Amino acid sequence: MNYAIIAAGEGSRLAQEGVAKPKPLVELQGEPMIGRLINIMLRCNAQSISIIVNEHMTEVRQYLENLELPVPLNLVVKTTPSSMHSLWHLSRVIPRGKFCLTTVDTIFKEPDFKGYIEAFEHDTEHDGMWAVTPFVDDEKPLWVDVDEQMNITAFRDQSWEGAQYVSGGVYAMTDKAFSVLDQCIEQGISRMRNFQRALVDAGHRLQAYSIDKIVDVDHADDIATAEAFLAS
């Protein structure tokens, strides 16, 4: 499996709340968040890892450039206006075929992630598999509508009666998605959630994979929450 990490955000909220380190280098259980993700990916049969960081994250860039990995590390240094644009730049270096993308501040337990990756590796019917969760942690969650077979039918900004899942910020897909991504860029569309909607509109078969709990690290107090979650 090829992997990709979006770590191009400014981390401004953490900085405003007194966290000195850039978000990707914030430690959880003694390990930088981005290093933790890389190590989990390596243990989940990584063939390559592609990462985008913004041009101001010199510490993060140096950290990544000093790593010695057993697989290719494709590092993109680019400041982008949205995660969707970050993915577009990554799409130029991600090897063809299946890959899994996550944002750097998405925190999950390794066994849950491993089960998810194995499910997508063995799947032959879908163009993508989205990690979803019934645990709502995001300030502006993206709600995921599914049918009885957990096929994704829509992405919605608002909840509704009977809504069960929100996006977990982890996306497994194939390079077929890149043509839709190119169209979004050409049309001036922004935001990752709008790219996801475009995939559904284009007829891509996306399945939801439920993970009980996924948390984000957006604020300083989220660090302790994430530590407690991983230790539980």
Image (cartoon, grey):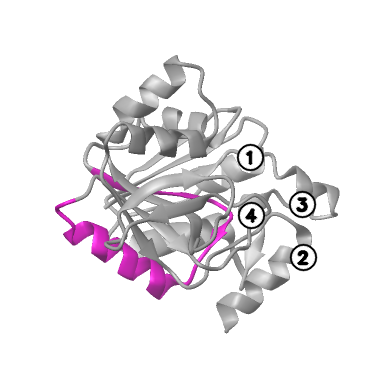
Secondary structure type for disc 4 = helix
Label 3, residues with CA under 10 Å away: few <14, some 14-19, many ≥20? many
Amino acid type, callout 2: Asp
Dot 4 or dot 1, earlier in sequence: 1
Of helix, strand and loop, which one carries label 2? helix
Which residue is drawn at the image coordinates 38% and 28% (left, top)?
Answer: 181
Pinpoint residue 204: horizontal percent, then vertical percent. 27, 39
Q: How many marks?
A: 4
* Residue closest to the far top: 186
Is residue 111 in the magenta section? yes
**In the image, residue 216 lies in the stretch drawn in magenta:** no
Residue indicated by mark 3: 14
Q: Secondary structure at mark 1?
A: loop
The residue sitting at 63% across, 56% down in the picture is 138
Mark toward the start of the polypeptide (2 vs 1)? 1
| Figure check: 231 above or below 14 | below
- Residue 194 point in image, percent of width and height: 49, 34
Precedes in sequence: disc 2 or disc 4: 4
Q: Quadrant of the C terminus?
A: bottom right
Farthest left residue in view: 124
How many residues crowd around disc 1 within 10 Å: few (fewer than 14), some, or many (20 or more)? many
Under mark 1, the amino acid is Gly
Please indicate, yes or no, whether residue 158 appears anywhere in the rendered image: yes
Instruction: Tell me the residue that label 4 is attached to.
Output: 25
Kindly identify which residue carries mark 1: 9
> Disc 3 or disc 4, which is closer to the eye?
3
